[in-house]
Image (spheres, rainbow, N blue to C red):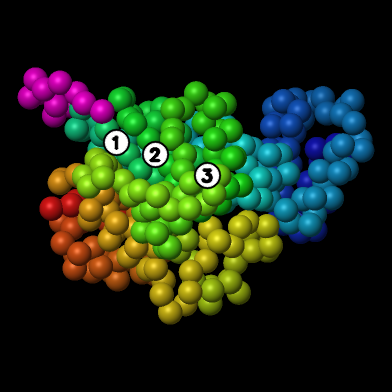
Amino acid sequence: MTYQKLIRQLTTVYDEGEAKAIARMVFEVRYGLSLSDLLLGKEAGIPEDELEAITQRLLQQEPVQYVLGETTFCGRTFHVEPGVLIPRPETEELCHWIIAADLHRQTRTVRNSLLSSAVHILDIGTGSGCIACTLALDIPQAQLTAWDISKEALNIAKGNAKALGADVTFEQVDILESWGQVHDSAASLNHTTCPRDSFDLIVSNPPYICNKERAMMEANVLEYEPHTALFVPDDDPLLFYRAIATYAQTALKPGGSLYFEFNPLYADTLYSLLRTMSYHGIEIKADQYGKQRMIKGIKM
């Protein structure tokens, strides 16, 4: 099958621009062929049955990242499969914001001639581990802990951390059930909570899509990505934010930062929630599409 033929098949399901992007990704990621190679017809010799199997999965609208088993996040390759959410560009922007803030902290520390110390960070709902691994690798002296309710997600995240050389401690935690109590990996029993003032920074990209929004979602998201990582009840869209922000009131050090990615529909409500909970220096940032998407609050 040629590059052009794959595009033609995919246009029965996707618009032309998306079909071209998916086809190019297949040939580049799976077979190491650039666009120039494809225009020169260098795809000859690729096993027809293998490419046909990939095509059939794509025609079922399975996300190309799952079909290929990987995606790029902040310039690194992460393994993904249906047990974890596919990392989005908006989440990359959240990481860039955190990293930039830390660079400012480092500059201020050097200016004041203070010794730099470890930065203790907690990532809640780590999924593929994209946030935790990125911060572990891009923030000097970062010490990362990452939580997720899903054993499957944690196994994927651990594999990504190992492949990238990121030092992250992964723990199975249900933040809604235990509000920070760590589950024993063997018996799934709660034991101790983290001590007070444990973290300099807590970050989360929790589920934030209400069930009523399902009708507006693409099939490749709705039918393949894990619903536990996507949806919250219509009557409680800030369910995870309230639980995490409450936990952070104890777990963050004084002056520690809390970062969230959120649904733009609830920007004002989330701002009010953090203000009511006595966080200060609250700042909202828009994503590359101009939608309010990220928020930061500082513990008193």
Residue 9 in view, yes or no = yes
Q: Amino acid at mark 2?
A: Thr
Residue with the mark numbered 1: 120
Residue 94 in view, yes or no = no
Residue in front for this viewpoint, 1 or 97 = 97
Residue with the mark numbered 3: 185
Q: Tell me the SS state at disc 2.
A: strand
Per the model, the C-alpha gap separating discs 2 and 1 is 8 Å
Q: Upstream in the sequence, badge 3 or badge 1? A: 1
Quarter occupied by residue 246: bottom left
Q: Amino acid at mark 1?
A: His
Q: Upstream in the sequence, badge 3 or badge 2? A: 2
Per the model, the C-alpha gap separating discs 3 and 2 is 15 Å
Q: Tell me the SS state at disc 1.
A: strand
Quarter occupied by residue 245: bottom left
Left-right relation of 2 to 166: right
Q: Which residue occupies 23% across, 69% down?
A: 272
Q: Residues within 10 Å of mark 1 (few under 14, many from 20)?
A: some
Please, which residue is most extreme toward the left here? Answer: 112
Q: Tell me the SS state at disc 3.
A: loop
Q: Which residues are magenta?
A: 107-118
Quarter occupied by residue 217: bottom right
Residue in front for this viewpoint, 139 or 49 = 139
Q: Amino acid at mark 3?
A: Ser
Residue 128, image x and y in percent? 54, 43
Residue 9, image x and y in percent? 83, 51
Q: Is residue 39 above or below residue 216?
A: above
Task: Say if mark 2 contacts mark 1, CB within 8 Å.
Answer: yes
Q: Is residue 266 above or below residue 141?
A: below
Residue with the mark numbered 2: 145
Q: Which residue occupies 77% across, 50% down?
A: 58
Per the model, the C-alpha gap separating discs 3 and 1 is 22 Å
